[in-house]
Amino acid sequence: MEIFSNSFSTIFYNPFFVFRRELYSNIQRIGSTFTNTTLDFGCGTMPYKHLFTNTKQYIGLDIETSGNPYDRQPDIVYDGKLIPIDSQTIDNVFCAEVLEHVFNPNDVLQEINRILKPNGQLLLTCPFTIFEHEAPYDYARYSSFGLTHLLKENGFEVVEFVKTGSYLSTVLQLIAVYIYFAIAKIPVLKHILFIALITPLFLLSLLADALPITIKRKDLYLNNVVLAKKIR
């Protein structure tokens, strides 16, 4: 589970350190405010469950189990069409890095809206800059404008929108992943090369983000983190 965390120690072995760092922090910050019932839509192994510290009931839902006995299994299996939960019974929905893997985002958001109570909250994250992954089930990338439009169209109001990663840290993360894929098949030297070639890029990224750079461009970034509220 450490690959999902923002622990500084992962700078020495996690090729997605920059990608995960701010994503994790924002999920932790917003997720800790959720109370009562939270549904983790597309939960996978529920790597963020421990961040929802004030949630009384945390329910994991996914389309299928992975078959790995070491993985945490979902509480509810979803058929990809109807969420098997009564309307207006859930206080919060958490949907992390799922929307880019569904071909029918409007249908999914309408179902999420249906099960949420009035004024229920949706914490939604999805990448803006990342390589194709989980092939062939990788269908889309969403800009801030696209996500805002989708949410409004399906009965939500955006409460907070965070773009993680600066222009420079995004570029450095992509270079780091490129190097990682190049060295991943060198078993003996892989870890040494990681520390020698990739860790310095991550340190540079941390330094760049900490400096008061005059030009703060946010049109190239890593992740979308959106807190939305059901309004209809």
Image (cartoon, rainbow, N blue to C red):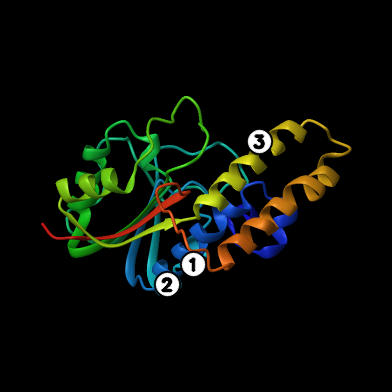
Badge 2 amino acid? Ser
The residue singled out by tag 3 in the image is 178
Q: CA distance from mark 3 to mark 1?
A: 30 Å
Taking depth in this image into account, of 74 and 51 the one nearest to the observer is 51
- Report the mark closest to the observer, 3 or 1: 3
The residue singled out by tag 2 in the image is 32
Image coords of residue 101 (percent x, y): 40, 35
Earlier sequence position, callout 1 versus callout 2:
2
Mark 3 surroundings: few (<14), some (14-19) or many (≥20) residues within 10 A: some
Image coords of residue 136 (percent x, y): 47, 24
Badge 3 amino acid? Tyr
- Report the mark closest to the observer, 2 or 3: 3
**Which of the numbered marks, if any, corresponds to residue 51?**
1
Image coords of residue 122 (percent x, y): 29, 58
Give above or below for 84 relative to 116. above
Q: In the image as oriented, which residue stretches furthest toward the left?
A: 232
Q: What secondary structure is found at the residue carrying circle 3? A: helix
